[in-house]
Image (cartoon, grey):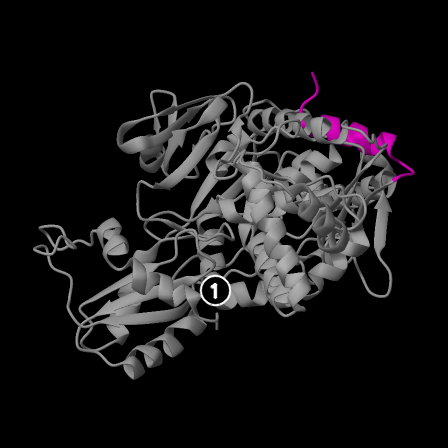
Amino acid sequence: MPNFLEHIFARLESAANRPVLAELRSPSPVSVTGGELLDEVRRARAWLRKSGLRPGDRCALVGANSILWVALDLALMAEGVVVVPLYSRQAPAELAAMVLDAQPRFLFCADAALGKSIAAAWPAGAMAPTARVTFQEVFLGQIMLGQAPAQGDIPNRPIPLADSALVTIIYTSGTSGEAKGVCLNLANVSFMLGCTTGRLDQLMHQPPATASDRVFHYLPFNFAASWLLLLSCLSRESTLTLSTDLNKLADEIRAAEPHYFLNVPTLLERVRRGVEDALGKRGALVRALFSRAREAWQRRADNQPRFLDSFFLALAGKLIFSKIRQRFGPHLRALICGSAPLAPETQYFFLMLGIPVLQAYGLTETTGICTLDDPTRPPLPGFVGVSIPGIQMKIGENQELLVRGPHIFPGYWRRPEETAQVLRSDWFHTGDQAEFGPDGHLRIIGRVKNLLVLNSGHKIAPEPIEEKLQLLIPGAQQVVVVGNGRGYLCALITGPVGDSSVQAALDALNPELPHYRQLHHFTVLAEPFTPEAGLLTANGKLRREAINSRFANQINAMYDRRQI
């Protein structure tokens, strides 16, 4: 049975004359066939061999999604090199910390400026930064190491690797705020791609059948689920079209005309709000029709239909819903959503439009996925799908979800104690609170620990931000960062402080933080939290659930404001 790399290389050979990857560039897209992609992979492998890299060495890869990113990723894995993908929009100091932790032989950067920014943030007294190489130096032959091997000497297949061989280290945030490297091996990824491609087969084999998948992609490849979609597309007869400008996302989606694409809840919720706002500005007849149709659809979903409901749904479907669907192109089968649970009202909204949203749930430590919605069955809003075949899940203490199976990572990079904390008796402790619903559907109901997960999928430890902000606000007694399941962060501040001093602190702190860790709004509470009020433990630690519950109205009010 071939492993995932062997299968991908074989598929690319069979697609020698068929486009497999495209970038949406102006004035026209740039694409490569399977054969052309293999040519680029061989070019990179020749460079890697001349550089002296050996199987098991580590190399970091940082840059926006591109054909060259994919080619270099495949080349590194084909040579047995462990890939450390990094988020190009991460703060340079955080990227430098990850590079320092991973100790890669090379840092491959999409451009020289990105590499320089990481080097400039290198911690004082630490070892010298790793060697930096741009993509152009690899693919355009600007080789400082002498003559590379001829590309003809490089086979169109990866070197043999054991199932236990590491293929990637993906960094993910922990409760301390310090990122941990999640190690994934060949067996982890091979197993998971069997699951993802199986689900995509189910989706695409429904009539009308199609010879090749059209897939759009905008999420960074350094995220586990995003990378898995890339590998799934390379494992199938697909053309994956890459976004190159998030500011033109709506136009790019229409140009790609996808059958499906991966999303985070942020985008889908933004689409829903945008449609509702736009319809709210239309004439009274359109507004009334949309309102009647929404009420009719909800009654139908609740099995409580009324007379004329079918009429209003049919009329809205022709005059309103069909025009909204056109924004996604003529081929759309489904939207796929992961990284964080999708709000039920948003999933209901897309179902009303005739667009199923298939949810997936998982962590980097579970090779990205534990559950996937079955495309042959209607999705259940509020739930994140059913477990993938071949794994086990159960509910442990404090309603924590425990998982085991061939997709569980072997451990954190150079962190045996933290590995032992989450891998116990063959079960991985996810840190997520969950419950099972009808037919094994899983619902995520909270976090066991304090880690905040935005609806963009970014995971954020609140404590470091709280500590920095409290230092910047004279008189502040407590600071609580909130935002779990939301689109951005806000803060509650207690003590005799004025709004102007808090805003000044935010103005000083936010520029130091990556965009997803910045604080957008705040509320000052005159009375500090106390143990007597049930808001602090006996030793003064925050009781976050109690605070979120007690001040739910104030928190909701911050999210009802316009985002800055």
Quarter the N terminus occupies:
top right
Q: Is residue 351 above or below residue 517?
A: above
**Residue 413 at what x, y percent from top left?**
44, 39
Q: Is residue 343 above or below residue 35?
A: below
The range drawn in magenta is 1-18
Image check: 362 left or right of 548? right
In the image shown, does 542 or 137 lie closer to the viewer? 542
* Dot 1 alpha-carbon crowd within 10 angstroms: few under 14, some 14 to 19, many 20 or more: few
Q: Residue at x 26, y 60 (%)?
A: 551
One can see residue 357 in this view: yes
**Residue 186 at what x, y percent from top left?**
59, 28
Q: What is the three-letter code of the residue carrying label 1?
A: Pro
Q: Residue at x 40, y 62 (%)?
A: 489
Name the residue at the front extreme: 307
In the image shown, does 429 or 346 lie closer to the viewer? 346
Image check: 176 left or right of 38? left
**Residue 485 at what x, y percent from top left?**
43, 51
Name the residue at the top extreme: 1
Image check: 279 left or right of 17? left
Q: Quadrant of residue 8?
A: top right
Which residue position is annotated with label 1?
Answer: 514
Name the residue at the bottom extreme: 500
**Residue 130 at what x, y percent from top left?**
54, 55
Verify whether residue 199 appears in magenta: no
Q: Residue at x 66, y 28 (%)?
A: 199
Identify the secondary structure beneath mark 1. loop
Q: Is residue 142 above or below residue 38?
A: below
One can see residue 335 in this view: no
